[in-house]
Image (cartoon, rainbow, N blue to C red):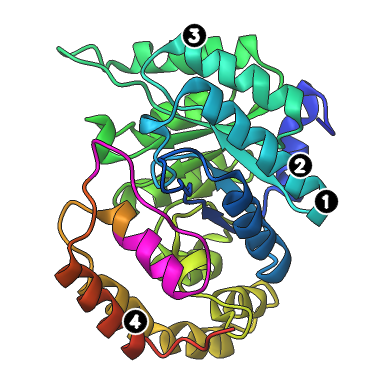
Amino acid sequence: MNYSKQDAKAYAKAHFTGVWAATLTPFDAQNRLDEAGLRANLRHWMGTLKLGGLFVSGKQGEFFSMSLAERKRSFEIAAEEAASAGSRTVMSCSDTNLDTVLELGRHAQACGADWIVVHSPVLHFGADTEDTIYEYYRHISEQLDIGIAMWNHPDCGYLMSPQLCARIAELPNIVAIKYSVPREMYVELSRLVGDKIQVSTASEEEWLDNIEELGWRLYLCSTPPLLLQTAADQRINDYTRLAFEGKFKEARVLRDSLEPARQAFKACKPKGKPQAHSKYWLELLGRVGGPVRRPLLALTEDEKALIREQFARSGLKLD
């Protein structure tokens, strides 16, 4: 780590910025972690696309179907590649078991991660009280030195209130949140925390407005920066740069020009198969996708044909 626990907020304010993306995890034909494929993808995303950083082994990365050893290995590979590329990482340590969260967090600290992200705990039978959730993050903050990003989304079964998030943001090494909630909620949280932590949400379509209206500097997102950009076509990066320079009119023209690609991507997404869809689209871009793991379902040949058809209509310039 390049910062102390007490300096975590200041370091994140300076360096946890720009366009980030959630990685997909390639598996090979024998269903093993494809380390060579992962490294090749990371080098493209970090080096060629020059993203601000990568969100490693999260939901898009199928962490739920990976062993603890595989998750740790993915951290090591990503940290090694980031060090070589001058990029940054936030490692997803989310899990239903708190001991596993802490074990992954300590491993992330040890292997050179910049930050970790932990989604709010999965709770049942009305246990999702604000005191329970606050204590969950307080304990993790106490046990770890690395900077921590909160993560809340409807899949958790509840939405954390802006007031609860702001309370947790007071902890010394809470540095950011990926807050995948209705806009009015993240606007309220931005008002409550100011620049104390970095606030972000998953939607690329809202990113430009949030730079202009809320002063955001971090897009801690999903897969659009990996799937809607190539070496020859980096409009998300480009409109972000223009917006950071205050050139919002020019940025909006570029942002809007990506709409055919956004619509093409959405038009071929089969219900219940987001990771398989993204991996096949990734392969059409020339990267390493590979199969999904159980319990996820593979694409049918008809689904692949529709993805190819929509990909051809996306207007993306290939490498």
- Of the numbered discs 4 and 2, the one sitting upstream in the chain is 2
Q: Residue at x 53, y 9 (%)?
A: 139
State the CA–CA distance, disc 2 to disc 3: 25 Å
Q: Residues within 10 Å of mark 4 (few under 14, many from 20)?
A: some
Horizontally, is 170 left or right of 188 in the view? Answer: right
Q: Which residues are magenta?
A: 277-296
Marks 4 and 2, how far apart in space?
32 Å
Q: Residues within 10 Å of mark 1 (few under 14, many from 20)?
A: few
Q: Nearer the viewer, residue 121 or 291?
A: 291
Q: CA distance from mark 3 to mark 1?
A: 31 Å
Say which residue label 3 marks. Answer: 99
Could you tell me how far apart the alpha carbons at marks 4 and 1 are, in whole angstroms? 32 Å
Determine which of the numbered discs, if any, sits on residue 94 in the image: none
| Image quadrant occupied by the C terminus | bottom right
Kind of residue sitting beneath label 1: Ser
* Residue 283 among those drawn in magenta: yes
- Residue 281 makes an appearance in the image: yes
- Residue marked by disc 4: 311
Does the segment drawn in magenta span residue 266? Answer: no
* Residue indicated by mark 2: 80
Q: Residue at x 18, y 51 (%)?
A: 272
Q: Percent from the top left, x then y, of residue 53?
A: 65, 53
Reply above or below: 310 against 167: below
